[in-house]
Image (spheres, helix red, strand yellow):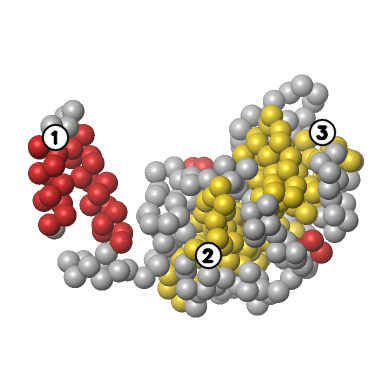
Amino acid sequence: MKTNSIFLSQCQTRRFLSTGLCIAALAILTTRLAAAQDGPTGTPKPIQEGKGHHFVCTDYTAGKVFIINADGKVEWEYAAGQCNDLWALPNGNLLFNTGHGVKEVTREKVVVFNYESASEIYACQRLSNGNTFVGECNAGRLLELAPDGKVVKEIHLLPAGKDGGHLYMRNARRLANGNYLVAHYGEQVVREYDSQGRKVREIAAPGGPHSVIRLPNGNTLIACGDMAGQQHVVELNAQGETVWEVKADEMPGAHLKFMAGLHRLPNGNTVLSNWLGHGQLGKAPLLIEVTPDKRVVWTFFDHQTLSTVSSVQLLDVPGDATKGEVWH
């Protein structure tokens, strides 16, 4: 291509530090051009297939929260550090984690709630009473914070002073009955704790659970990462029996790389966040909507704008996130 020829000439003229560096830079340029174009005609590739959605998502690598319209175009973005969890609230604000904290931000980008921690944080949730639930990974703490940020409830899952490490906890949710669901990523299990922090159930989650949802019918939906190549999404009933599962290579054109976020829709479809870290950038769709019979009806793959989508919530599906009406 002409652009590549010009680039090679510039490499030779400016005498890059090494031939290897020049070749590496050219490879990056070529990859980006290929992603943006559909061949020598320069026709732009589509950025989604199927009926698009209005949605909000986090990009862990870019460190941003995005709102994307149904045409696949960015209509709002906000710097958010290492964001892994988010909620679109009924008032239009967005609640999300920032790596070591949690923020609530208005559409005018005004911060109206902020919590900072020495611990890594991958989980947050606005409760029906106006408090905010936070899961602290290293500290192994489940917190409920008042609107002014003060701790009103604290559950310790680890002995005092013990650091659970980077892999201890990912997504976590406070349930309507006061219990807690926690994805213990490194241990490859999901545990349910009662309101006092006593374990009441444990579910094996090979691949490393990243997100976990308790559905209205009592089933548990789990998204698992890529440990030992076991990335998958599984739904289990109260007896621990698998009632639905999607594995890595079951859907043509939508290979699962690392299952991060989930949104189960009222029609039974599930939107999957296909996290493309660990060397998988650009190699699969970022978002996948799959039916109960495992048909892919929507994929989003704008690799020029987003890198690693870790959490997603559709905005064109009704429901009050603070009342358990959004299964995410």
> Mark 3 is on which residue type?
His
Residue visible at 66% across and 46% down in the picture: 97
Residue 180 visible in the snapshot: no
Q: Identify the element where label 1 is drawn.
A: helix
Q: Nearer the viewer, residue 220 or 269?
A: 269
- What residue is disc 2 on? 75
Which residue occupies 49% across, 78% down?
51
Residue furthest top in the image: 161
The nearer-to-camera label among 3 and 1 is 1
For mark 3, does the 10 Å Cα neighbourhood hold few (<14), some (14 to 19), or many (20 or more) residues?
some
> What is the spatial separation of the Cα atoms under label 3 and label 1, in whole angstroms?
58 Å
Which residue is the site of mark 1?
14
Q: Earlier in the sequence, mark 2 or mark 1?
A: 1
Where residue 156 appears, x then y in whole percent? Answer: 82, 33
- N-terminal-most mark, 3 or 2: 2
Q: Say whether marks 3 and 1 touch (CB < 8 Å).
A: no
Of residue 63 and residue 166, the one placed in the foreground of this image is 63
Label 2: element kind = strand
**Residue 156, numbered label:** 3
Decide if residue 43 is in sight here.
yes
